[in-house]
Image (tube, rainbow, N blue to C red):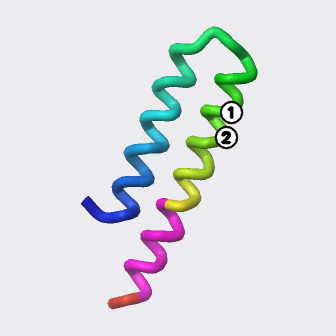
Amino acid sequence: MTQAQHYRFQAEQAKRLAAQVSNDEVRERLLEMAGEYSRYAELMEARETDRF
């Protein structure tokens, strides 16, 4: 698993958890985390692409 795949997986996990919680603050934080993980994945993908 590449780093980008790892961060994409983490983003999906956070989104799934956010859909399951009833607390608005927790849901919002999980969605923020998902966004951060997605951005990390994009950075890792760009870094991997630049190598070749």
List the single residue furthest toward the left.
1
Residue at (51, 64) in percent of width and height? 42
Q: Is residue 49 above or below residue 21?
A: below
How busy is the neighbourhood of tag 1: few (under 14 within 10 Å), some, or many (20 plus)? few
8 part of magenta stretch: no
Residue 32 is labelled as 2
Location of the N terminus by quadrant is bottom left
Residue at (43, 87) in percent of width and height? 50
Magenta: predominant secondary structure element?
Answer: helix
| Mark 1 residue element | helix
Dividing the picture into quarters, in which one does residue 23 lie?
A: top right
Residue 2, given in percent of the width and then of the height, sits at 30, 64
* Kind of residue sitting beneath label 1: Arg
Residue at (73, 17) in percent of width and height? 24
Residue 31, given in percent of the width and then of the height, sits at 63, 34
Q: Is residue 48 above or below residue 9?
A: below
| Mark 2 residue element | helix
List the single residue furthest toward the top.
22
How busy is the neighbourhood of tag 2: few (under 14 within 10 Å), some, or many (20 plus)? some
Residue 26, given in percent of the width and then of the height, sits at 67, 23
Residue beneath disc 1: 29
Dividing the picture into quarters, in which one does residue 40 lie?
A: bottom right
Residue 8 as seen in the image, left or right of residue 23: left
Location of the C terminus by quadrant is bottom left
* CA distance separating discs 2 and 1: 5 Å
Residue 39 as seen in the image, left or right of residue 24: left
Q: Is residue 20 above or below residue 44?
A: above
Residue 22, given in percent of the width and then of the height, sits at 63, 9
Residue interval drawn in magenta: 41-50
* Kind of residue sitting beneath label 2: Glu
Dividing the picture into quarters, in which one does residue 49 lie?
A: bottom left
